[in-house]
Amino acid sequence: MEHYDLIIRGGNVVLPDGVTQVDIGVKNGKIAAITATLEGETTHEWNATGQHVLPGMIDIHVHFSEPGREHWEGFTTGSAMMAAGGCTTFFDMPLNGIPSTVTEEALLEKARIGNEKSIVDFGLWGGLVPGNEDDLQPLAESGVIGFKAFLSTTGNKEFEAVDDMTLLTGMKKIAALGKILALHSESAAITNWLKAEKEAAGLVSADDYLETRPILAEVEAVERALYYSEITGCALHFVHISSAAAVAKIEAAKARGMNVTVETCAHYLLFNHDSLREKGTIAKCAPPLREADEQQRLISLLAEGKFDMLSSDHSPCPYEMKDPKDYNLFQAWGGISGGQFTLLSALELALAHNIPLEHVAAWTASNPATRFELADRKGSIAIGMDADLAIVNLNEAFTVTEENYYAKHKQSLYIGHTFPSSLAGTIIRGHIVVQDGKVLPSVNEGSWQRP
């Protein structure tokens, strides 16, 4: 009789072509069997009756700040938080750590730390910044997922925005290396000019902040990047796009055959500018949360399949950097803390708008795996794939509290939000790391994943 390390029995399994009630057998970290009734012995068994089993989420956009700023968020707390949200692989962005991941040496050191501390698997982005163009090839050869650059001011002296010449030179080199460039696309000229005008007039309200980062600033940057891509042949991925007008530009580029993908984030879909008005700095991010009508446009675009993937853009910091007693809305650090909640957000949207669950799996797993060359092992529930799974209760609500949020800093836009579904378990390469919604102690199963 066949022996498995783990059998998950009776779950509603989200396969690429729909949801089917089947058993899953796991052996040596891989999915070894998928069948209606699996015969065999097993070391561990999970009764998934009444639960749904999805491929583990791949969150391509998080900011952990180790080394150098582990007190913001590090691999230990950050990966536990991701696991608690059904994420089995995350991609860490190259900024906020000290040093930033803009050299091969910095990349290998971050990978070493991640291999020691991470509960789930991870990939690492490299950076494109002024002066590191010669570092791009060794970074690519060492295994970065791709490269990240900013078209707006970063507020981080270790990771500066690119000027046009750096961008063009970098894009040409990245194209030759066969890699992807991810872009934070807001026009620095527009946003900095508007910010200076507001601050000179002493105007620092939530409405003023939104007006300094208009949709036009996003559209201009996206359009410029697409022109540069046509010239250089560089594949692009647009991160945290927040407007329908920018999506229209990207859709038109796709129609012309350009190699481009686009993500949005859960917070742009679940929240809007009213949250910034009501909650202040906790809800500050860039691009900003948009007005309610734009939020609805983004939800419609998601339902229509215009976004390739969802990410969290988990961007935490110590609360004192956002404390309104010390900083006004323009001065406070910008970034939404919420990496634990992207899969639950996707499920909330799917249930509310009658979107098939296989679309959720595409946004959160298979599309990221395919785009970033991990689809040989990640992103879908199929025989031979890594046994990376998220098990959810669709009809069991989950309210976010400081006690059940695993991030290092508990102040978040999501505190108090009730999701209609909850996470029951997370399995990484066949190992149960979250059970009954709780992260198991002393489980470091993560490893660096390279394309």
Image (spheres, rainbow, N blue to C red):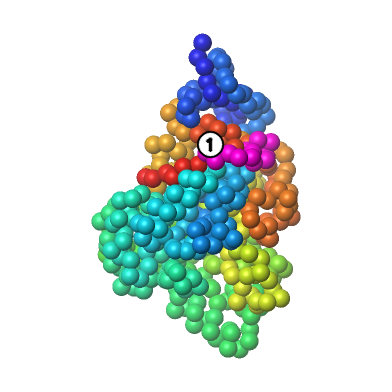
- Is residue 110 among what the camera can see? yes
Query: Of 107 and 299, which appears nearest the observer?
Result: 107
Left or right side of 156 for 82: right
Left or right side of 101 for 7: right
- Give me the residue at 59% from left, 85% from top: 199
Q: Is residue 42 magenta?
A: no
* Quarter of the image that includes the C terminus: top left
Q: Main secondary structure of the magenta part?
A: loop
Q: Height in image: 46 above or below 439? A: above
> What residue span does the magenta drawing correspond to?
434-445
Query: Residue 339: x percent and y percent?
Result: 59, 52
Query: Residue 222: x percent and y percent?
Result: 42, 66
- Give me the residue at 72% from left, 54% from top: 402
| Element type at mark 1 | strand
Residue closest to the far bottom: 201
- Give me the residue at 43% from left, 28% from top: 384
Mark 1 neighbour density, 10 Å: few (under 14) some (14–19) many (20 or more): many
Query: Of 162 and 123, which appears nearest the observer?
Result: 123
Left or right side of 56 for 372: left
Query: In this figure, what is the number of numbered marks?
Result: 1
Residue closest to the far top: 1
Query: Residue 322: x percent and y percent?
Result: 65, 70
The residue pinned by badge 1 equals: 428
Query: Residue 165: x percent and y percent?
Result: 31, 73
- Give me the residue at 52% from left, 20% from top: 4
- Is residue 381 among what the camera can see? no
Q: Amino acid at mark 1?
A: Ile
Residue 234: name its quadrant.
Answer: bottom left
Q: Height in image: 267 above or below 190? A: above
